[in-house]
Amino acid sequence: MSITIKTPKEFSFKECYRFLDRSDKECLHDVKDSKVYKLLTIQGQLLLIEIEHSKDILLINCLNKRVNKSEKTAIIEYVNEWWDLEVSLAPFYKFCKSDPMLKKLVKNHRGLRMIGFPDLFECLVWAIIGQQINLNFAYSIKQRFVEKYGTSLEHKGQKYYLFPDANAVSQLTVEALKELKFSRQKANYTINVANAILLDGLDKNKLVKLGYDEAKNELKKIKGIGDWTADYALMKCIRYPNAIPLGDVGLHNALKEQLKMSTKPTKAALIKFGTEWGTHNGYICFYLWRSLLKDN
């Protein structure tokens, strides 16, 4: 029997699916035949879920185990958080109506939800991997890392993976990560984050309860986490609506393209945008990133 989630009014499975399908090197979910496949760990169990859409319902099946009531509840909570389904987009769409660029973004990608990271460790490590390199290379590194150190489950001849956990990563050496094409710095930073979670009390639930500035300062105490990485995590995992990684190259490229600028926006212009957009920063940034994906 399928688990069901009623989708919110402003929701497009097509848009969410397209975002999830942005790289053929993605190893933590699979998309095919209008279905999304994701391996989860729930209450110590590996659960492979399949998500499809029908009218205003997400249908979720667990493919490798008959799930109990508490596992069903946990799956629903995970998908709701992963796809940001419990947030109303109405205020965001209302705000965008008064700006030609934003109005066009919403028209083109209406119903797109901010696909995020329920797990803080995964989010931070992915951000570290992506620091100052192109997205395709970052996906290649992540794929090596996950396939080498992540837990896997095989189903019908295909392997599905979980992101390596902080405990496993804390025991790795810099040299082991360098073999996967991590730079020495990024290897150190990745191990630093694992230790911060295991030894220093870095905790998602604690960050959620802090104000934006305080949460950002907590993250930046970890060597290897600067403004861009902290804001990325605050936007995509902690879900602060005003968080935006203003130093992001993809954001710059999208703004240049959407505004038909001859050069990328200046730092002053970016700060001005971030101030004007306010509590809609995160979603505007996400929709701008989406605009860079070419539709098939």
Image: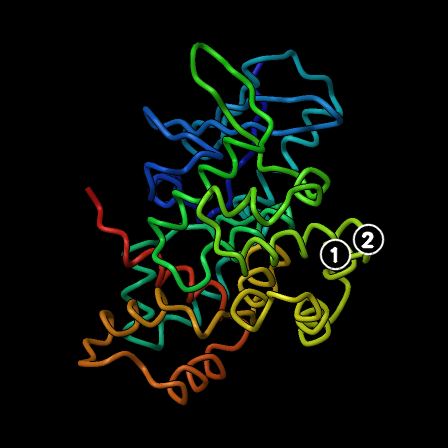
Q: Quadrant of the C terminus?
A: top left
On the image, numbered disc 2 is attached to which residue? 199
On the image, numbered disc 1 is attached to which residue? 196
Circle 1 — which element?
Answer: helix
- Please name the residue shown 56% across and 53% down the image: 187
Packing grade of label 2 (10 A; few <14, some 14-19, many >=20) is few
Q: Nearer the viewer, residue 293 or 58?
A: 293
Q: Is residue 1 above or below residue 286?
A: above
Tell me where residue 233 sits by quadrant: bottom right
- Please name the residue shown 50% across and 31% down the image: 147
Which amino acid lies under the numbered mark 2 shown in the image of this protein? Leu
| Residue 277 location (% of width, % of height) | 46, 77
Looking at the rendered structure, which numbered label has been put on residue 115? none
| Residue 111 location (% of width, % of height) | 40, 50
- Please name the residue shown 22% across and 81% down the image: 263
User: Total marks drawn?
Assistant: 2
Packing grade of label 1 (10 A; few <14, some 14-19, many >=20) is many
User: In the rendered structure, are the residues bearing label 1 and label 2 in contact, judged by CB atoms less than 8 Å apart?
Assistant: yes
Q: Nearer the viewer, residue 54 or 217?
A: 217
Which amino acid lies under the numbered mark 1 shown in the image of this protein? Ala
Q: In the image, 230: left or right of 130?
A: right
Q: In the image, 217: left or right of 124?
A: right
| Residue 128 location (% of width, % of height) | 53, 57
Circle 2 — which element?
Answer: helix
Q: CA distance from mark 1 to mark 2?
A: 5 Å
